[in-house]
Amino acid sequence: AQSVSQHNHHVILSEAASLELGCNYSYGGTVNLFWYVQYPGQHLQLLLKYFSGDPLVKGIKGFEAEFIKSKFSFNLRKPSVQWSDTAEYFCAVNGPNSGGSNYKLTFGKGTLLTVNP
Amino acid sequence: NAGVTQTPKFRVLKTGQSMTLLCAQDMNHEYMYWYRQDPGMGLRLIHYSVGEGTTAKGEVPDGYNVSRLKKQNFLLGLESAAPSQTSVYFCASRLGGAAYNEQFFGPGTRLTVL
């Protein structure tokens, strides 16, 4: 079964610091990769996704992520965080695309980001 | 478009009581999902549906039942609630077809079982 690991449980940064959140998945075949964000008290919203092509994908609010197939990784980055980026971030993987598994997402346990003003 | 809506937003139950959570979507999505979110556990899939009249078990289905009688609605039932079912429940939906179609989430239902 697919598994997703997010290395950091809680990250604390100051405004303007750079951010990188790690995400690794277990399956080596064709996958679709997602980052979702959950602001305090709200539902999950899509930040960005990768399914093919350029391994560097750009999302909303200045976030980007790089898919490195050889490392089974899909790390999220932002060059300069803001206080409003305080939220929980979830990496998710859809795959392998067979046997009905492509219907489902496997989520990591999430990384809580706190940005201090 | 309202997107994905969930009712109720909050509920407190006593052990052994039953209840139904309703999820509705107005995006004509084929697939619908129920997750539970617990601190430090991420989101875990309870049940899902790939079309009207069809349902399937997810990662943590025990103690829950679901029904998808209409394409736009996906109901999650707890027949005999237990304290271990205290959680935040999220519904999601997505288009069928390509696996890269993202899921859209509802606002959640916070359930406490005493």
Image: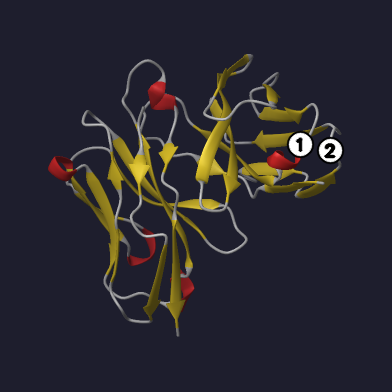
Asked if residue B60 lies left or right of residue A18, the reply is right
The image shows residue A107 at horizontal and vertical percentages of 43, 42
Identify the mark at residue B15; answer none if there is no mark: 2
Real-space Cα separation, disc 2 to disc 1, in angstroms: 5 Å
- Residue at the disc numbered 1: B82
Residues tagged 2 and 1 counted as in contact (Cβ below 8 A): yes
Task: Tell me the chain of label 1.
Answer: B
Identity of the amino acid at label 2?
A: Thr
Label 2's element?
loop
Taking the spot 60% from the left edge, 41% from the top edge, the residue there is B36
The image shows residue A91 at horizontal and vertical percentages of 38, 48
Task: Tell me the chain of label 2.
Answer: B
Taking the spot 40% from the left edge, 35% from the top edge, the residue there is B101
Identify the mark at residue A61; answer none if there is no mark: none
Label 1's element?
loop
Residue B88 visible in the displayed image: yes
Residue B28 visible in the displayed image: no
Identity of the amino acid at label 1?
A: Ala
**Front residue (pair A1, B23):** A1
Taking the spot 70% from the left edge, 23% from the top edge, the residue there is B65
Is the residue marked by circle 1 packed among few (<14), some (14-19), or many (20+) residues within 10 Å?
Answer: some
Name the outermost residue toward the left.
A70
User: Can you say whether B92 is above or below A29 in the image?
Assistant: below
**Front residue (pair A15, A54):** A15
Quarter of the picture containing the N terminus of chain A is: top left
Could you tell which of marks 2 and 1 lies nearer the N-terminus?
2
The image shows residue A59 at horizontal and vertical percentages of 33, 56
The image shows residue A110 at horizontal and vertical percentages of 44, 53
